[in-house]
Image: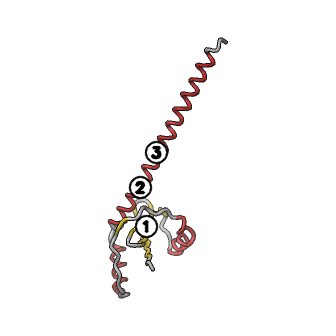
């Protein structure tokens, strides 16, 4: 049975509060970035996770190392404190977010190109129709 682990990191990135959901499944990391706006309370974050977790759009998976070990609660607490003090998010997460951003950018470019070409074709057909109407001997 495969183990799936997840982590939510909430931090302040001028001028908004950002949440980064990290999901590790089958040795691959995928990430989703959410903008909260004003500083969210714990219960607001919990409510957001309960309501919107399945609607989140995760980035494409990136290979990562999975660490398996029993964890000392005091050590976990120290690590959480250290993470709270450090700025930003992990480099693997940043890579996954960047990959997702690039993917969305290419999708947006192709959609706008198709729309532009369709509009150009429509204008051309309209011009052709007007030319035909002029030459019908009216």
Total marks in image: 3
Count neighbours of disc 2 (C-alpha within 10 A) and say few if under 14, some if 14 to 19, many if 20 or more. few
Residue bearing the label numbered 3 = 110
Identify which residue, 35 or 8, lies in the foreground. Answer: 8
Q: Quadrant of residue 55?
A: bottom right
Count neighbours of disc 1 (C-alpha within 10 A) and say few if under 14, some if 14 to 19, many if 20 or more. some
Residue 125 coordinates in the image, percent (x, y)? 57, 28
Residue bearing the label numbered 1 = 20
Identify which residue, 2 or 13, lies in the foreground. Answer: 2
Name which residue lies at 57% across and 23% down.
Answer: 128
- Residue 85 left/right relative to 136: left
Q: Select label 3 or label 1 by which is in front.
A: 3
Quarter of the figure that contains the N terminus: bottom left
Residue bearing the label numbered 2 = 101
Identify which residue, 118 or 94, lies in the foreground. Answer: 118
Label 2, label 3: how far apart the Cα atoms are: 14 Å
N-term mark: 3 or 1: 1
């Amino acid at each position: 049975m495969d183990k799936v682990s997840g982590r939510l990191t909430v931090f302040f990135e001028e001028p908004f509060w950002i949440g980064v959901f990290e999901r590790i499944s089958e040795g691959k990391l995928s990430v989703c970035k959410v903008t909260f706006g004003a500083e969210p309370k714990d219960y607001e974050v919990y409510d957001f996770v309960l309501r919107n977790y399945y609607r989140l759009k995760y980035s494409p998976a990136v290979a990562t190392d999975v660490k398996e070990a029993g964890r000392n609660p005091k050590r976990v607490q120290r690590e959480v404190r250290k993470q709270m003090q450090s700025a930003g998010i992990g480099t693997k997460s940043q890579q996954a977010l960047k990959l997702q951003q690039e993917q969305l950018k290419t999708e947006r470019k192709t959609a706008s190109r198709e729309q532009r070409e369709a509009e150009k074709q429509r204008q051309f057909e309209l011009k052709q129709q007007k030319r035909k109407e002029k030459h019908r001997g009216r």
